[in-house]
Amino acid sequence: MYRAQLLAAVGVDGNNNIFPIAYAIVEKECKDTWQWFLNYLTIHIEIEEQYLWTFMSDKQKGLLEAFEEVLPNVSHRFCARHLHNNFKNAGFPGHVLKDAFWKAARATTVEAFNIGMSEIFELDKEVYEWLSTKLPSEWSRSHFSPLSKCDMLLNYVCEVFNSLILDARDKPIIKILETIRHILMARIAFNRDKAETWTSGDICSIIKKKLHTNMKGASGYIPPKADSWNYEIIGSTDIDTWAVDLYNKICSCRKWELSGIPCKHAICAI
């Protein structure tokens, strides 16, 4: 009823859960209000080396222009689900094209991405040309910066945050802010208490599950050793061969670099 907008920045914690960082109510969503929000965000979370930071958005009104003014050197990602919706709205529906799009988005190497794009080209040249106008660094893991140690393709963290604060939205402005504060206080306290029950030391529970999944996958590989730190990981086919550098925490599949979690090839070498 106050015709205002809620701006928010939501991050990911060490257990891959959402971690709301900042929120503010403004008159309207535009370049000026986003610029004001980003300026305060930059100060409070002390963003100095911008190239180390990655922001994902749905390219809200005025947001990209505000980034150019305040944080021109951060990495950007565009939610792949929203990109796919734009993909369909542009006149490219169908499950075959959808599968080809997600194959290219989930590719972790440039080679795999190029193969995926070649398949899209063979299916529909217009789709290929439409996707070629989008920077792959914004929607495909193959071109993501490894510095953020996060391989997320979907902006689900903001969607979860929006669902958390749904009951607050119809209240007066001060009451909205107080309701959100109480919701976040209770959530942080709950997560803190839950973490104290974990028995896996420094490894969070969701990350531990991912490690166990990768450990099972590692059993299908043979790890010939090249030197003290380097291994050639051999799978069941000629193309399923990977190079692992344990010292630098690198695998040629790039999954270890992107997520910070050892992939099945790295675990095989370890």
Image: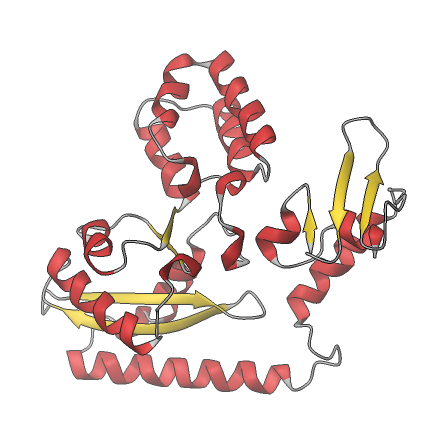
Q: Residue at x 60, y 55 (%)?
A: 259
User: Where 200 sits versus 268, above or below?
Assistant: below
Q: Residue 88 location, x and y as percent? A: 36, 29
Q: Is residue 30 visible?
A: no
Instruction: Looking at the picture, tell me which residue is in the foreground, 24 or 231.
Output: 231
Q: Residue at x 55, y 30 (%)?
A: 113
Q: How many marks?
A: 0
Instruction: Looking at the picture, tell me which residue is in the foreground, 241 or 231.
Output: 231
Q: Residue at x 28, y 75 (%)?
A: 43
Name the image colouring.
secondary structure
Instruction: Looking at the picture, tell me which residue is in the foreground, 159 or 78.
Output: 78
Q: Residue 226 location, x and y as percent? A: 86, 45
Viewed as shown, does residue 179 lie left or right of 211?
left
Q: Is residue 123 visible?
A: yes
Viewed as shown, does residue 247 lie left or right of 220?
left
Q: Residue 108 location, x and y as percent? A: 59, 40
Q: Quadrant of residue 71?
A: bottom left
Quadrant housing the N terminus: bottom left
Q: Residue 214 location, x and y as percent? A: 76, 53
Q: Residue at x 85, y 55 (%)?
A: 228
Viewed as shown, does residue 41 lie left or right of 259?
left
Task: Name, please, the residue furthest toward the front.
Answer: 227
Instruction: Looking at the picture, tell me which residue is in the foreground, 151 or 173.
Output: 151
Viewed as shown, does residue 139 lie left or right of 72?
right
Quadrant housing the C terminus: bottom right
